Image (cartoon, rainbow, N blue to C red):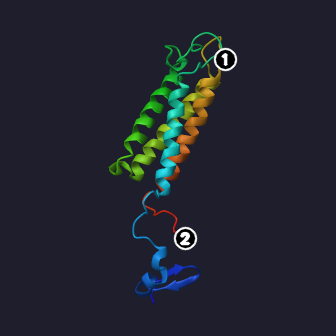
Amino acid sequence: MCLACATPVRGQVFGAECLGDVLGSDAPSELEDGARAPDARIRTIGRIGFAAAVLATALPWSRFGPGSEAFGAWGQTAWWSMVAGVAAIAGLTLTLAQLRPSLRAPLWDAVAAALGAVVALAALVAVLFPPAFSRPWLGPWVAVAAGVVACGASVVAGRTVGRPADIGI
């Protein structure tokens, strides 16, 4: 048999003619009811990351001065926190839209990963360069962590698009 026809299964190599007999009931043709592909579970983690980043904008972003109140990310002097907040809202919107099968392409996962990276980097810049006479507080740290989670989950989801659920082959 040629390399194109050879399919390794459990340590042995089979051709296309015998593959169906060997796999038998172990290979479902479609995902079973309730089973979800790995990319769907990972996208849920990304959605949670973006939701946490959106919620982080409601926290105080500094201990003193501008941004020290609720919704501190949306202050007029905190530019990087607003960039993080807008990217978090855009990422959450995109990952919710990815519940539709037409938006589950790797390109959309790359866009979601980029938005997660923008959230993490903008929040990190807000930590490193807070407004004058203030110190960063809880909001930007939560946004950094949430952005990293959202970015990582989107990258992993983009790499697993179209792969069937683990069936032990």
Residue 32 against residue 85 in the figure, above or below: below
Q: Nearer the viewer, residue 1 or 56?
A: 56
**Whole-percent x and y of residue 43?**
48, 47
**Whole-percent x and y of residue 110?**
45, 47
Residue 5 at least partly seen: no
Identified by mark 2, the residue type is Gly
What crowding class fits label 2: few (fewer than 14 Cα within 10 Å), some (14-19), or many (20 or more)?
few
Q: Nearer the viewer, residue 29 or 126?
A: 29
Q: Secondary structure at mark 1?
A: loop
Q: Nearer the viewer, residue 145 or 19?
A: 19
Please give the residue where the numbered disc 2 appears in the rendered image: 168
Identified by mark 1, the residue type is Arg
Going from N to C along the chain, the mark reached first, 2 or 1, is 1
Q: Secondary structure at mark 2?
A: loop
**Whole-percent x and y of residue 114?**
48, 41
Residue 155 at least partly seen: yes
- Quadrant in which the N terminus is drawn: bottom left
Residue 78 against residue 8 in the figure, above or below: above
Residue placed furthest toward the left: 102
**Whole-percent x and y of residue 6?**
47, 83
Q: In the drawing, does residue 72 fall left or right of residue 33?
A: right
CA distance for labels 2 and 1:
51 Å
Please give the residue where the numbered disc 1 appears in the rendered image: 135
Tell which tag, 2 or 1, sits nearer the viewer.
2
Residue 129, quarter of picture: top right
What crowding class fits label 1: few (fewer than 14 Cα within 10 Å), some (14-19), or many (20 or more)?
some
Q: In the drawing, does residue 52 fall left or right of residue 32?
A: right
Residue placed furthest toward the bottom: 1
